[in-house]
Image (cartoon, rainbow, N blue to C red):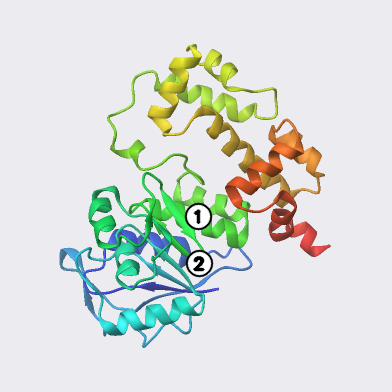
Amino acid sequence: MRVGILAYPGVALFELSCAVELFALPRPEFAHWYQTQVISLESSPLATTAGLTLSCEQVADFADFDMLIIPSWPVAQAPSSALSFVLKQFAQRNGRILSFCSGAFLLGYCGLLANRKATTHWRYADDFQQTFADSNYVDDVLYVYDGQIGCSAGSAAGLDLGLEVIRQDFGQDKANAVARRLVVAAHRSGGQSQFVQKPLAPLVNRFSQTLEWAIKHLDKDLNVDKMAAHASMSRRSFDRHFRATLNITPAQWLNERRIENAKSLLETSQYSLEQVAQSAGFDNPITMRQLFRKQLNLSPSRYREQFNAQQKVS
């Protein structure tokens, strides 16, 4: 897959570097990987922050790429007619587009987010919703993915979005390997509020230990009451603390972890669906199937067809 990372005068270097780290860093440990260039419609060199200049390949359009990454964009700056035209042209041929942080503003200015889920950094949320009222803004998430367009909520959340795309393209194992090299979590639960609230209470140590314990016992008869007991908390206090910490309910968190377990087993094993459901901690395959359709919009069988390398070889 050919990837273009869009640079422009004043491009945010952190978001640009996140895109480079995710998609352009050589990974000789993988047999197949992205072919990535930093590109611009402008002639080099490009002025950036702190007096640095950036040289990159100048292009006339995005026809040579399958995926385009918008690292950021000035929130009050409409794009040039040339950039708007080639970006719309790219979207019309179903090119995949990822925006990091304020990069969603460029997509909005180009009319690519009409009737589509979108998000951006919480500090720009009001301006974004007022400027692009035709978009379906999603609050308090790390990223959204709608059709061929994905938006991340902030700078570091671009890593979360990029890791999800890598998982879709190459599977959970490679996404995990990239995350380990970045020294970040392969998947973070919750939304932006967990990063703008006050620091966690001292109880977080016991709470964190309970989460680690629960992950190791997902295949047991585990429920929220048992998690609360392990944390030495009442069920009501545990529920309240869980939502304040991760912005989701304990039941939602358990379902997400079990889905992740099931995805890994579907990708790497030849277990039957009954065995996958049992090993992942679901009470039965029907529950697993319902949650897969709700969260991933596809069945476990279909997921296995897409991502199980052993099945593809056979």
Residue type beneath disc 1: Leu
**Mark 2 residue crowding within 10 angstroms, few (<14) / some (14–19) / many (20+):** few
Q: How many marks?
A: 2
**Extreme-left residue of the structure:** 51
Q: Secondary structure at mark 1?
A: helix
Q: Quadrant of the N terminus?
A: bottom right
Element type at marker 2?
A: loop
Q: Which residue is mark 2?
A: 148
Say if 209 sits above or below 298 in the image: above
Q: Nearer the viewer, residue 236 or 271?
A: 236
Who's the residue at 23% across and 77% down the image? Answer: 46
The three-letter amino acid code for the residue at tag 2 is Gln
Q: Quadrant of residue 112?
A: bottom left
Q: Is residue 280 above or below residue 132?
A: above
* x, y percent for residue 19: 40, 63
Dot 1 or dot 2: first in sequence order is 2
Residue 29 visible in rendering: no
